[in-house]
Image (cartoon, rainbow, N blue to C red):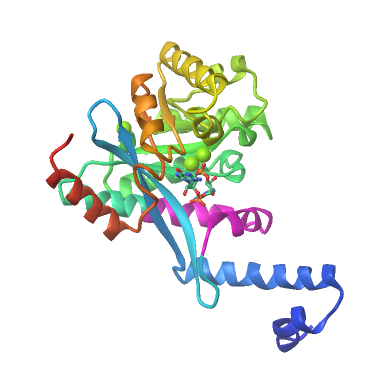
Amino acid sequence: YSAKRSRCGVALYDDTRDGEGRHRLETVEQLRTGISAGQLVLHYQPKLDLRTGEVDGVEALVRWQHPERGLLPPDSFIDLAESAGLMSRLTATVLDQALAQCRAWADAGLVLDVSVNISPTDLVDEAFPAEVARQLHLHRLPPTRLVLEVTESLLMADRERAVRVLQQLRDTGVGISIDDYGTGYSSLAYLASLPVTELKLDRAFITSMPSSPRAEAVVTSTLQLARSLGLVLVAEGAEDAETVAALGDLDCDLVQGYHVSRPLPPEQLAAWLRSRSQVPST
Ligand code: C2E
Ligand code: MG
Ligand code: MG
Ligand code: MG
């Protein structure tokens, strides 16, 4: 297996599985190098407060600026990073960039919470809470400025350890959000026992809300649940004005979606925020 052969392996060999295996290995190596070389970049999607009409915070979403293949979406490399043992480094890089950006905004007079997605690996890593605290300290940010988003499925793996790590994170003061809420199989009793601060209702419910009274019933009852547990409810995936208005009528706390803004590179987000404050609110 010379370096030369592995470079053109995909094109030279018919055996698809073997080709895929080589392609995967090559991509893993590129990702390993790419993380060190600063090829991971973050785009930020606003979370809009429906009551005040102001941006409460942003979610950091990673992209890979691949030297040959262009800007790659997270779905194309997150699983790979996870299975190749690169996830801790990926999370550390994302956290560092997101907090540095949050610091830069704060220095410019812009107070925004920042949400970072974390993975199963992070939640079973007993050293992770200390790493988060170290990074917050390094970037001189209060823990309340950071929200960590975890998916339900992620909490299923090694429950006891995950809950312990979550509790430690919560004890440091960071917010904890359940992402894609409603798509997993966790019991309500289990979710209610977790040290969380936010529920993010999955896009599937939001998208079908205008056409489906059942989806609207799910949104309404989740909102009641969030209220009674003292949690913030975020609706993700609001793609049109009608949906945003309906969420406002239901008194949903925060909304994210293409209708508000797509995820943007930091400079564009700053421009978007500036343009908003110049336009009188309607
Ligand atoms: P997520 O955390 O649930 O993020 C929401 C995804 O929905 C994002 O896709 C976002 O661009 C997209 N989205 C936002 N508004 C709308 C909308 O109105 N309509 C539709 N159709 N889509 C919308 P993205 O950026 O491709 O991220 C996909 C997933 O990758 C994320 O889902 C998250 O699970 C994962 N991910 C992203 N960044 C990171 C990261 O830094 N670390 C880890 N571990 N996972 C990440
Ligand atoms: Mg998320
Ligand atoms: Mg906060
Ligand atoms: Mg989500």
Quadrant (top left, top right, bottom left, bottom right) of the N terminus:
bottom right
Residue sitting nearer the eye, 91 or 134: 91
**Extreme bottom residue here?**
4
Measured as percent of width and height from the top left, residue 137 is found at 32, 45
Q: Is residue 128 above or below residue 64?
A: above
Residue sitting nearer the eye, 266 or 164: 266
The residue sitting at 36% across, 36% down in the picture is 241
Residue 253 visible here? no
Secondary structure predominantly adopted by residues drawn in magenta: helix
The residue sitting at 59% across, 54% down in the picture is 75
**Extreme right residue here?**
15
Q: Which residues are magenta?
A: 72-97
Measured as percent of width and height from the top left, residue 181 is found at 55, 29
**Extreme top residue here?**
228
Measured as percent of width and height from the top left, residue 171 is found at 42, 28
Locate residue 6: give its quadrant: bottom right
Say whether residue 160 is left or right of residue 248: right
Say whether residue 84 is left or right of residue 150: right
Query: In the rendered picture of this protein, how many numbered marks are placed on residues?
Result: 0
Q: Is residue 248 above or below residue 88?
A: above
Quadrant (top left, top right, bottom left, bottom right) of the C terminus:
top left
The residue sitting at 52% across, 28% down in the picture is 211
Q: Is residue 232 magenta-colored?
A: no
Residue sitting nearer the eye, 259 or 131: 259
Q: Is residue 137 above or below residue 86?
A: above
Residue 82 visible here? yes
Measured as percent of width and height from the top left, residue 149 is found at 48, 38
